[in-house]
Image (spheres, grey):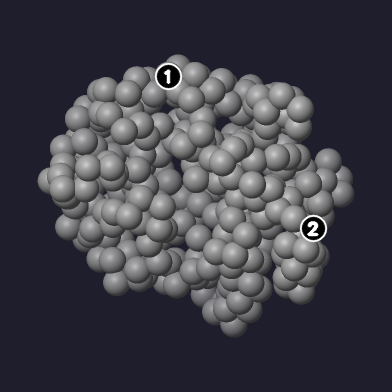
Amino acid sequence: MILEGIYAPVPTPFDLKSGDISHSAMEDNIRRWAVTSLNGLVICGSNGELPFISVSERAELTRTAKLALEKSGVDKKIITGTFMHSTRETIDCSVRAADAGADAVLILPPHYFKAAGMSGAKKFFEETANSSPIPIVLYNMPGNTGVNLDAETVIELSRHPNIIGVKDTSGDMTQMCRIANECGENFSVFCGSGNYLLPSLAVGASGGTLAVANLYPESAARLLKACMESDMPRARALQYRLMLASDALTRKFGVPGLKASMDRAGLYGGPCRSPLSDLGDDEKHRLFDALDSTGLDEYESWRHIC
């Protein structure tokens, strides 16, 4: 599996009354994303409220996504977040995700007992990769974990045949540049935020997993295409507009903001799972004003034809 292009880390839809996962809403969202330029979907990542989703729920969501894509007749990859705090449970979750149809798994480094450091992280990933039936994508998310998966560790792990890439959400371009240029050609680097997609591509990333791609997949795809065609003025202009949207959706309003914006755009966002709280009306107005100011809706005609 080659990791490239634009992936959307999709939110997990919960029923308004029961709080259970709404598989019908998941199917409907994926039917809509199926007609876009997205190369793949990430199930149960940070935007999918990973810490609040059980092992069995992750497998069920993966199976629902796989079937929905098959019904739509499109070839988009599925990556499922399978991090658990123990190696044993992470392996079990990865096996279940594979059985449910995932093409790869996305795994955070251990971060509760931080004294283990990078040597502990390396052992964790190697043991999991040895047992996982599908490839592993490393997930560096220091803003949430408090642990930065450093360049040296990623470079060492890139030599494992079942570890195919990294999603880096650190925003550290020096680190990303090293990883992109010192890992083997079969190892891919993905940007983890629309805030810095263009700089990441410039130093060697092959694409990105972007929260903003849930709403603006065509805008992100246009940026990627402009970069590949060396049309830097167009790429820079798109990056600026995408950054404004991404910054509002991720840094300022987070998962509740993404879900509220999806509801407004005709997708199903729905409520967050406790302890996350939904946005209030004033926050929604500020978020929607910020998104509208980007003008990116002009590229997202798929919302109106689904």
Q: Identity of the amino acid at label 2? A: Asp
Mark 1 crowdedness (10 Å alpha carbons): few <14, some 14-19, many ≥20: many
From the viewer's side, name the closer residue of 241 and 205.
Answer: 241
Q: Nearer the viewer, mark 2 or mark 1?
A: 2
What residue would you read off at disc 1?
Answer: 96
Taking 197 as reference, is 74 left or right? right
Name which residue lies at 50% across and 45% down.
46
Q: Position of residue 157 (x, y in %)?
A: 20, 45
Q: Position of residue 80 (x, y in %)?
A: 47, 33
Q: CA distance from mark 2 to mark 1?
A: 39 Å
Q: Identity of the amino acid at label 1? A: Arg
Mark 2 crowdedness (10 Å alpha carbons): few <14, some 14-19, many ≥20: few
Taking 193 as reference, is 18 left or right? right
Q: Which corner quadrant holds the C terminus?
A: top right
Q: Secondary structure at mark 2?
A: helix
Taking 34 as reference, is 211 left or right? left
* Quadrant of the image occupied by residue 74: top right
What residue would you read off at disc 2?
Answer: 281
Q: Of marks 2 and 1, which one's residue comes earlier in the chain? A: 1
Q: Position of residue 14 (x, y in %)?
A: 68, 32
- Vertical relation: 115 (above or below) 22: below
- Vertical relation: 175 (above or below) 273: below
